[in-house]
Image (cartoon, grey):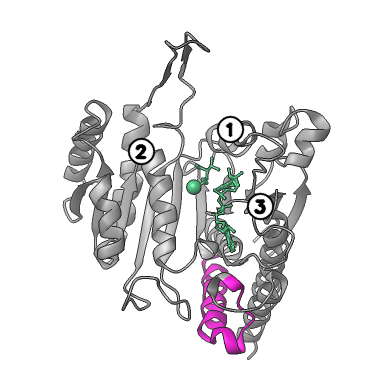
Amino acid sequence: TGRQRIAVIAGDGIGTEVMPEGVRVLRAAADVFGLSLEFTEFDFASAEYYERHGDMLPEDWFETLSAFDAIYFGAVGWPDRVPDHISLWGSLLKFRRGFDQYVNLRPCRLMPGIPSPLAGREPGDIDFYVVRENTEGEYSSVGGIMFEGTDREVVLQETVMSRTGVDRILDFAFELADRRPARHLTSATKSNGISITMPWWDSRVREAGRRFPEVRLDQYHIDILTANFVLHPDRFDVVVASNLFGDILSDLGPACTGTIGVAPSANINPSREFPSLFEPVHGSAPDIAGRGIANPIGQIWSGAMMLEHLGHEDAAAAVVSAIEAVLAKGARRSPLTPDIGGTGTTAELGAAIAEELGASALP
Ligand code: NAD
Ligand code: IPM
Ligand code: MN
C-alpha cells in the first residue's frame, strides 16, 4: 500500500506520556507488516498552546488536518489552567463535529491478566461495544442563562436530535450487531422521564430494527441499564446510546473490566470524506500526570483501531494480540502499570508490547 499520513496530537497531561508509546507500537507494527506510515506531530489542542495563542487551535486547523488519513489523539484538558468547557469545545469537540465523526465506537473487553472488580468474571464474560452518537444530542450549545446574577436566574440547555443524525448512528449499530455472532443490540434511553426526545429515539430504533430482522433488540432505561452493566455485563453485545448516555456507559463499561486505562475509542467519519480520530477513552489525568505511571494500553489499542480503519486488519489484530500476551503474563513477568496491579512505568509497558509484537513476527 502507499504512504499513509497520520496527524499526532498528544494534548495535555498523560496524553503526552501515553502518546509516545502508541507511536512506538505503531512503528513496530509498520516494521513487521511493511506499512508506510508517516507521523506528523502537532502541539495545538493543549493548555500550553492556549496560554501562548489565546486559542486551542490555529485558524487553519480544518484544512491542515483534512490533509491526513487519520488523527491519532491523546487527551486534552487541564482544568487548573483552562476551564474544561473552553479547552474541550475549542478542540476535541470541534474535531468530532467538523470532521463529522458521528460514530464513537468504544470496545469494552475484559482482558486476560486484569482482574475485574466484579466477582467471578473471566475474560470472555465482558466483551461488548458501546456505540455512542458523537455529534449532537445532549452536547449542544443551544441555550443560555436568563436573569443572570439575580434570584430569578434560569438556565436552559437544549438536547438536539435530528432524524438523519439518529438514524445514521442506529444503522451503524445495527450493522455492527448484524456482523457479530450474538446479533444483539441494546438501546439506552430514558423515555419515562425525558418525554420528547427519548420516546422519539425509541421509535427510530424500532423502525431501524425492521431493516435488521436478524438482530435481537433490547431497549432499556439508562438507570437500570447501568445497574445491569455491573450485575450482568455478559448480557451485552452492542449497546447504542445518545452522546451523553454513551459517554457515561463508556467509562462504566471499562471500569467493569478493571481500569479505564485500557479502553480505546474510534471517532469515525464513515463516509471517509474527512479523517477519523483515534484516542483513548480516558482523559489527561492531572492527578497522576508527570509520574510516568499512566497505562498506555488505551492509547496503543486505539492505534490498533486506527490500523484497522486504514485497511491493515492483520497489523491491527497483531497489536491487540501483543497487548493480550503481555497482560496475560501478569505483573510478575510484565511491567504492568499500577492501575492494573504492577509497578511498571508507562514506557516499560509500551516497550514490552512493542517487543512482543516484534517477537511474534519472527519465523
Ligand atoms: P480522567 O480520565 O483524566 O481520569 C479519571 C481517573 O482515572 C483519574 O484518577 C486518573 O488518574 C485515572 N486514569 C485515567 N487514565 C488513566 C491511565 N491511562 N492509567 C491509569 N490511570 C488512569 O478523567 P477526569 O479526571 O474526569 O478528567 C481530567 C481531564 O481530562 C479534564 O480536563 C477532562 O475534561 C479531560 N478529559 C479529556 C478526555 C479526552 O481528551 N478525550 C476524556 C476525559 C476527560
Ligand atoms: C470523552 C470525554 C469527552 C466527552 C469530554 C472531555 C468532553 O469525556 O471523550 O469521553 O464527553 O466526550
Ligand atoms: Mn468520557
Q: Distance between the residues labelled 1 and 2?
A: 27 Å
Q: Where residue 133 sits: x, y (%)?
A: 40, 40
**SS label for mark 3:** loop
Q: Is mark 3 within 8 Å of ligand 1?
A: yes
**SS label for mark 1:** helix
Can you see residue 336?
yes
Q: Residues within 10 Å of mark 1 (few under 14, many from 20)?
A: few
**SS label for mark 2:** helix
Q: Which of marks 1 and 3 is nearer the N terminus?
A: 1
Magenta range: 312-338
Q: Does the magenta stretch include residue 327?
A: yes
Kind of residue at badge 2: Arg
Q: Residues within 10 Å of mark 3 (few under 14, many from 20)?
A: some
Out of 5 and 78, give the one closest to the viewer. Answer: 78
Residue drawn at point x = 55 percent, y = 63 percent: 261
Q: Mark 2 points at which residue?
A: 168
Provide the major secondary structure of the magenta segment.
helix
Residue 195 image-quadrant placement: top left
Q: Mark 3 points at which residue?
A: 286
Q: Where residue 2 sits: x, y (%)?
A: 68, 58
Q: Is 195 situated left or right of 252 in this image?
A: left
Q: Which numbered marker is on residue 85?
A: 1
Q: In this view, does 83 lie above or below 268?
A: above
Q: How far apart are marks 1 and 3 (CA)?
A: 16 Å
Q: Nearer the viewer, mark 1 or mark 3?
A: 3
Out of 184 and 149, give the one closest to the viewer. Answer: 149
Q: Where residue 179 sits: x, y (%)?
A: 31, 60
Q: Which of marks 2 and 3 is in front?
A: 3
Q: How far apart are marks 2 and 3 (CA)?
A: 35 Å
